[in-house]
């Protein structure tokens, strides 16, 4: 379910077809999309073993060793890939990584959405690099760290706290990698 006003139109990402664009300003940290009706979950191994699985053309979102399967393609599927996205996927939710201007295309890093080691059939349009799914641990750790920093910044902005603490957290997070 999309949680922002939007429109679907020709993408600015080369070769991507359609894209999803916000029609209003969006604050950093705001939820862009939230999980809605999920028809079923299946073990990811079913798709690994059978690339022509009858549900392979559905909207599939991977998590741990399973994936959600939805036969319809909601408008959120028009969010295209970027290695420097303005949307952050975390446990099925997509958050605004930064303030997003009206008319800006919403992008996410597909490496969080596809199975571990799965390679998309196209390259990143900016870098020319392959898009390969992260492991569950990599995805969970990196998205959790990013959501934590987003929430901390939002809290500090609303409470007037110092941004120095957020910067030291960023260094702490980077040091742990």
Image (tube, rainbow, N blue to C red):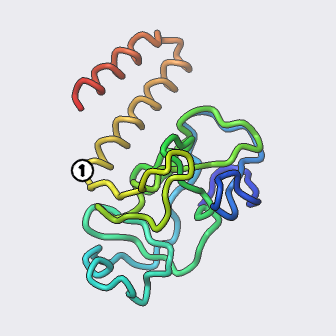
The residue under the point 76% across, 40% down is: 102
- Looking at the image, how many numbered discs can be counted on the residues? 1
Which residue appears farthest toward the bottom when viewing the image? 54
Q: Residue 113 at what x, y percent from top left?
A: 42, 59
Q: What element carries label 1?
A: helix
Horizontal relation, residue 52 to residue 135: left or right: right
- Local crowd size for mark 1, using a 10 Å CA cut-off: few (<14), some (14–19), many (≥20): few
Q: Residue 18 at what x, y percent from top left?
A: 70, 63
Can you identify the residue that label 1 sits on?
A: 137
The residue under the point 42% across, 56% down is: 131
The residue under the point 68% across, 56% down is: 20
Q: Residue 72 at what x, y percent from top left?
A: 57, 78
Horizontal relation, residue 91 to residue 21: left or right: left
Please determine whether, in this image, residue 142 is positioned above or below residue 8.
Answer: above
Please determine whether, in this image, residue 31 is positioned above or below residue 7.
Answer: above
The quadrant in which the N terminus is found is bottom right
The quadrant in which the C terminus is found is top left
Q: Please tell me which residue lies in front, 137 or 117.
A: 117
The residue under the point 43% across, 85% down is: 55
Q: Residue 13 at what x, y percent from top left?
A: 65, 53
């Amino acid at each position: 379910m999309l949680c922002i006003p939007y429109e679907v139109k020709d993408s600015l990402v080369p070769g991507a077809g359609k894209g999803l664009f916000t029609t209003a300003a969006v604050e950093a940290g705001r939820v862009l999309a939230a999980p809605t009706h999920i028809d079923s979950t299946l073990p990811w191994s079913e798709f690994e073993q059978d690339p022509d699985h009858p549900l392979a053309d559905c909207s599939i979102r991977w998590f741990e060793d399973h994936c959600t399967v939805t036969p319809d393609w909601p408008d959120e599927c028009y969010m295209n890939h970027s290695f420097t996205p303005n949307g952050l996927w975390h446990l099925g939710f997509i958050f605004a990584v930064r303030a997003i201007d009206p008319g800006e295309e919403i992008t996410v890093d597909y490496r969080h959405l596809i199975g571990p080691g799965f390679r998309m059939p196209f390259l990143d349009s900016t870098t020319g690099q392959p898009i390969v799914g992260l492991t569950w641990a990599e995805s969970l750790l990196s998205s959790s760290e990013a959501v934590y920093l987003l929430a901390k910044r939002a809290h500090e902005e609303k409470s007037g706290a110092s941004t120095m603490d957020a910067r030291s957290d960023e260094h702490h997070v980077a040091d742990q990698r």
